[in-house]
Amino acid sequence: MTGKAKPKKHTAKEIAAKIDAATTSRGGGKAGLTDRTGQIKGGHAKFECPHCKITAPDVKSMQIHHDARHPKIPFDESAIVDLHAAHTSENAKIKPGVRGSYKK
């Protein structure tokens, strides 16, 4: 139990995590719209549902979506549209987060 007037110290791990969260883009909001829709080569949304055009990062997530939203239509893995196939080249590196700033 700590005393009344003793301030709690922040750990180096906690400070580093705050800096990382402040300077790395996680792809949310308007800035991450192209990332989520798969229009850039490093985007998260890789697959698109052929029925309702919603995006998902992997086949398992797309199958969960399909079972929940389209239960009457049988799931066909070959019908899923791969958004990254049209936008990436073989030598491009895919990065999930884009470093925004090195300013601390």
Image (cartoon, rainbow, N blue to C red):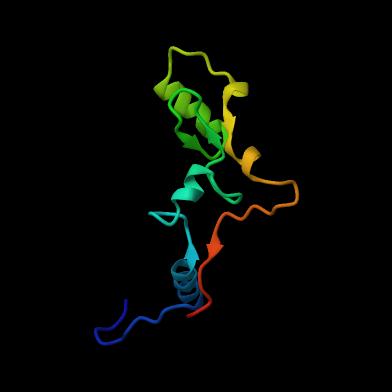
Q: Nearer the viewer, residue 11 or 35?
A: 35
Which residue ends up furthest to the left in the rendered image?
A: 4
Q: Is residue 87 above or below residue 2?
A: above
Q: Is residue 18 left or right of residue 44?
A: left
Q: Quadrant of residue 95?
A: bottom right
Image location of residue 104, percent across then percent down: 47, 80
Q: Quadrant of residue 47?
A: top right
Q: Is residue 41 left or right of residue 31?
A: right
Q: Is residue 9 left or right of residue 44?
A: left
Q: Is residue 95 above or below residue 99?
A: above
Q: Is residue 98 above or below residue 101?
A: above
Image location of residue 8, percent across then percent down: 35, 81
Residue at the location (31% across, 80% down)? 2
Q: Nearer the viewer, residue 99 or 12?
A: 99
Q: Quadrant of residue 86?
A: top right
Image location of residue 52, percent across then percent down: 43, 26
Q: Nearer the viewer, residue 64 or 81?
A: 81
Image location of residue 68, percent across then percent down: 41, 24
Residue at the location (52% across, 13% down)? 74
Task: Tell me the quarter of the image containing the N terminus.
Answer: bottom left
Residue at the location (46% across, 30% down)? 53
